[in-house]
Image (spheres, rainbow, N blue to C red):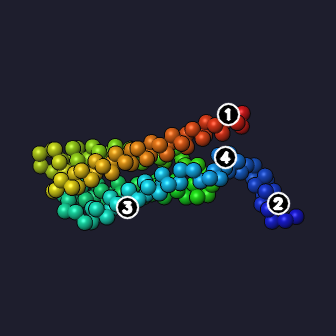
Amino acid sequence: MDMDTDRHDERADHGHDERADHGANPSERGKWLSALIALLGAWMIVQALLLELTAAQFWNDILIGALLVGVGGYNYSRRADERFANTAVSLIAVAAGLWLIAAPFVLGADTGLTETANELGFYNDIAVGLLAVGLGAYSAYQARDHQEDTRRTNA
């Protein structure tokens, strides 16, 4: 018996193969979506260090940036392993993006209209939030669409 046959037999012995459950992703379709989400998170961290921000915005941008790096990295690793993105994880990116859009208004530093010590930080949060919502929603749509296709073909 060769190595590939042994691995196949091991998976059969354990009851299932995760790739068989979720379908193969041979073209690694959508891998760039996850990479862009992670890059948005990295940008949020970098800009928090470069711009003069209020304490609330600084920590908000660091935490949301780390969250976006985490969810983007997780789905990227799934796609690199020939699996599709996790829909729930993609929706976390959407929620983080919605928060970034709302945060300058919710956490207002003085008048409640802006959270930032400068306008660049204010508009950066909104722009990154819009991008995170769009990329996360499209990634979730792709993952959900594929999961439904896989269920129909397996039934």
The residue that label 3 is drawn on is 42
Tags 4 and 2 touching, CB below 8 Å: no
Tags 1 and 2 touching, CB below 8 Å: no
The residue that label 4 is drawn on is 23
The residue that label 2 is drawn on is 5
**Is 43 located above or below residue 20 in the figure?**
below
Q: Residue at x 41, y 59 (%)?
A: 39
Residue type, label 3? Ala
- The earlier-in-sequence mark between 4 and 2 is 2
The residue that label 1 is drawn on is 152
Q: Residue at x 15, y 44 (%)?
A: 112
Which type of secondary structure does the marked residue at label 4 adopt?
Answer: loop
Residue 22 lies, in percent from the top left, at 65, 46
Which type of secondary structure does the marked residue at label 2 adopt?
Answer: helix
Q: What distance separates the C-alpha of mark 1 from that of mark 3?
A: 38 Å
Q: Nearer the viewer, residue 1 or 133?
A: 133
- The earlier-in-sequence mark between 3 and 4 is 4
